[in-house]
Structure formats: C-alpha cells, structure tokens
Amino acid sequence: MQRQVTPELLDSPHCPPREVEASLLDIGRINRWFGGVATTRRLIERVAAATGKKHFSVLEVAAGLGEVPRIAGEQLGRKGITLDITLLDRVRSHLLAGSRSVVADALALPFPERAFDLVSSSLFAHHLEPAELTHFASEALRVSRVAVLINDLIRHPLHLALVYAGFPLMRSYVSRVDGVASVQRAYVPEEMRKILSNGNQPARTVEFSRHYLFRMGVVVWKETWSCC
C-alpha cells in the first residue's frame, strides 16, 4: 500500500466550526477506544522505567482537546507517575478552553532549549512530509530534556478497511473523510525509522513499538539519556 497525501478537512481554515467540534470529539472517542491513549501511556511508562523518573513536564503538540495526555496522565497517576501538561496547537479553536495551552506552530516551537521533559504528539506525524518530520524531531528534541514521543497510525490495507467499517461510529463527515486520508498518509515503522535516522542529523537512539489496532509508538531519546 503506497503512501498517498490527501489534505485533511480538519486542517482547513474553512472547516465549519460545528464540524470541527464534532470531529475533535470523534477523535477523542477513537483515541479512548482504539489504542491512542494506551499507546501514549505505554511510551511514558517506558521512559519512566528507563530513567527512574516519576514526574514529567509534557508538551503535547497538535494537541486538540488534549484528551490523550490527560487520560494517560490519570491512568499513570494510579501507578505513581505524574504529568504536568501543556497543550500546543496552531488553531486556538481546537484547544480545550481553560487548559494550559499555547497557540503556535509545532515546527517552530516558541520555547527555549530543554523547556520540557517530554515533547509528545498523537496523530500528528502523518500530517508531515519526510523533511517536515525530520525538522519536527529536531525541534522537539531541542526543547526536550529526556525524549520525544510519537504516537501515530500505521499504514496498512486492513487498517483502511477498519476505518470504513467504523464509519457508523463517527458523527462527523469530516471524521470519515479524514480517517481515510489519515491512514493513506500514515507511515510504516521502516519509513519512520529511516526519516528519524536521517544521515544529516546527529546520531539518535530511537525505539519503535507496535500497539493495538495499527498504532505505532516511537521514543526518540535525548542524547544525554540512555534508553538501556
């Protein structure tokens, strides 16, 4: 299955506000039910186990309503791991009112070096072309102290079939259109590994894991931390 790049409606400034709201709620349900929250939780558990840390400041980029880090944080709290979360999105209307949030571009993070322990993203990487993804990884590493976490889809024909089968669960037509486009735009782990190990970048330790229903987890370690 070849990667296909089709613009997603939720990214458009012309997407109707009611559809934006409905689609963000759909994404939240999908993340809760089909592995999105669990993937981020397991990535943070991996970092906690490797570093011995029990508290992390987290910048969640392209955060939308921020349900993934919030619910993962609630689950981790039962295991003694706490998160201090800041949400970032380039569209203010996507962000949850009352949250600690910043409106900015994930490719030009408005923070100094080592501002957060972790920079995390969910369902963002497939929106980026390879050169943009390489740049995002570098920018995210710049402002992280420990690691960058990437939670995204895996492109696969069966995954695409599951999206079509899940149309009745989606309340917004934007979610249905974007769900298909997202799987078609997603990377496979081998492609992601090649992009994140770009020869023009400093050597990086990168870990990959596969999760429930075609989810990919990636930990890109800061050079000052050992993953072993």
Image: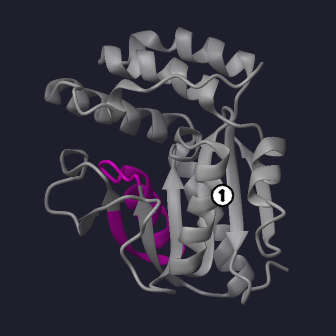
Location of the N terminus (image quadrant): top right
Say which residue appears at 31% left-offset and 28% top-offset.
23
Say which element carries label 1.
helix
Q: Position of residue 222 (x, y in %)?
A: 68, 80
Quadrant assignment, res 134 = bottom right
Three-letter amino acid code at the position of disc 1:
Thr
Is residue 216 positioned above or below 181 on the image?
below
Is residue 172 positioned above or below 198 on the image?
above
Taking the image as shown, residue 157 lies to the left or right of residue 78, namely right
Q: Position of residue 79 (x, y in %)?
A: 54, 73
Q: Which residues are magenta?
A: 62-87
Quadrant assignment, res 14 = top left
Taking the image as shown, residue 118 lies to the left or right of residue 52, namely left
Say which residue appears at 37% left-offset and 53% top-offset.
63
| Residue 83 forms part of the magenta stretch | yes
Location of the C terminus (image quadrant): bottom right
Q: Which residue position holds label 1?
A: 134
| Residue 162 forms part of the magenta stretch | no
Q: Position of residue 158 (x, y in %)?
A: 72, 17
Say which residue appears at 69% left-offset and 33% top-offset.
214
